[in-house]
Amino acid sequence: MKSKKMLLPIEKVNPGMITAEVVFNKMGNVMLWDGVALDSITIERLKNVGVQEITVHVDEPREKGIRYDYSSPVVFAAEYEQDANLTKQMFQDISSGKRLDAETTEEIVDSVLRKSESNRNIIDSITQVRSIDEYTFYHSLNVSMLCMLIGKWLRLDEYHVRNLALAGLLHDIGKTRIPFEILNKPGKLTDEEFEEMKRHSEYGYNIVKNLDDISPEVAKAILTHHEKEDGSGYPMGLTGDKLNLYSKVITVADIFDAMTANRTYKSKDTPFKVFELMQHGSFGILDPIVLNAFLNNVTSYYIGANVLLNTGETGVVVFMNKQNLSRPVVQVGDRYIDTSVSKFVRIKEFL
Ligand SMILES: [Fe+2]
Ligand SMILES: [Fe+2]
């Protein structure tokens, strides 16, 4: 189904609609970029700042068979836990020597795809606290959801979005072949242990390569998900021109989830710190088109967030600087602090 652009009064805008043009506030600042999927909280915030009408895509194709309202955080959380349990089961089955069960992977991927319009719930759930031994299951599920979102933001068709969700889910399946003591070691790995850990890409590829339900492109993405654009990754040191799009998408999703994860042995970075590292510290490592699609969309979910500044003041994020995504404009009382200009003011914490 083709979509068309339409200017709608804000009262007629529904969750799931996608912005077709940039949305500005009264002061002429960008509130939302185009191509952003709206949810009920974002729509409320637009109303609160006095936005009267916005241009959205209408007649976007909808997923068939939506059974629940996934914009409800409670329903989302219940399904998320259920999917994490299925992912755990899948990992345990492979560890005990069983073949990868296509029905289980399909069930999880279907569930992930049904949440394709729950962007805010996805972004909220990936920063939950997880214990070390459960980490890989939640991480796999999170990367699957993030790969799906990036696929949508890149405007890929259903076939590729589905493959991306599957590739994300299975990208670390080779960790089932890594000894338990290495995988769950709380401290730093020795060089030898790290070399063994790095082999999970190949182990994963060997698990999936001959399965009928897994396309060769998905298998290849699992093998190459730790390769880097400049050839500095592993296992083969391939450069970006040799990597498929699935692999590039997994790499971005994988890094974001790993950096924002709140594991017991590692304190997490604030998302803004992660955006800074991804935007300014990943030249030559991440694919710029995939990275931009990800950052331009994901950062819009932090507009309206309450933050604590290093000055001790609290404020609300009101505007993202596109050139400097980690330094948004923060409203404190009736003042606007542009943290990209006020170099000493930093966001310390999310509230
Ligand atoms: Fe990995
Ligand atoms: Fe990973």
Image: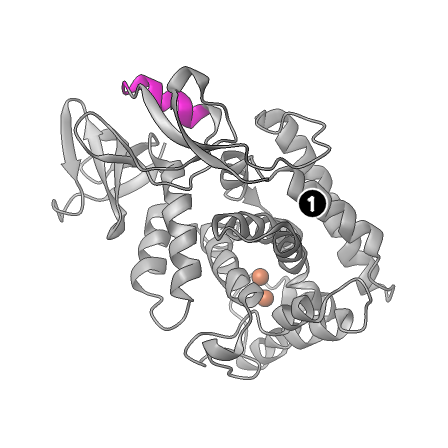
The residue at 86%/67% (across/down) is 97
Magenta segment's dominant SS is helix
Q: Position of residue 312 (x, y in %)?
A: 21, 33
The residue at 68%/56% (across/down) is 166
The residue at 12%/46% (across/down) is 341
Region of the chain picked out in magenta, as a range: 41-50
Q: Is residue 333 depicted above or below 153 in this figure? A: above
Numbered disc 1: secondary structure: helix
Q: Amino acid at mark 1?
A: Ala
* Relative depth, front residue between 153 and 348: 153
Q: Is residue 196 depicted above or below 330 in this figure? A: below
Say whether residue 3 is magenta: no
Q: Position of residue 249 (x, y in %)?
A: 52, 61
Which quarter shows the N terminus? top right
Is 23 left or right of 139, judged from the image as shown? left
Which quarter shows the C terminus? top left
Is 57 left or right of 82, judged from the image as shown? left
Q: Position of residue 283 (x, y in %)?
A: 33, 69
* Relative depth, front residue between 330 and 184: 330
The residue at 13%/49% (across/down) is 343
Q: Position of residue 43 (x, y in %)?
A: 41, 24
Residue 173 in sight from this viewpoint: yes
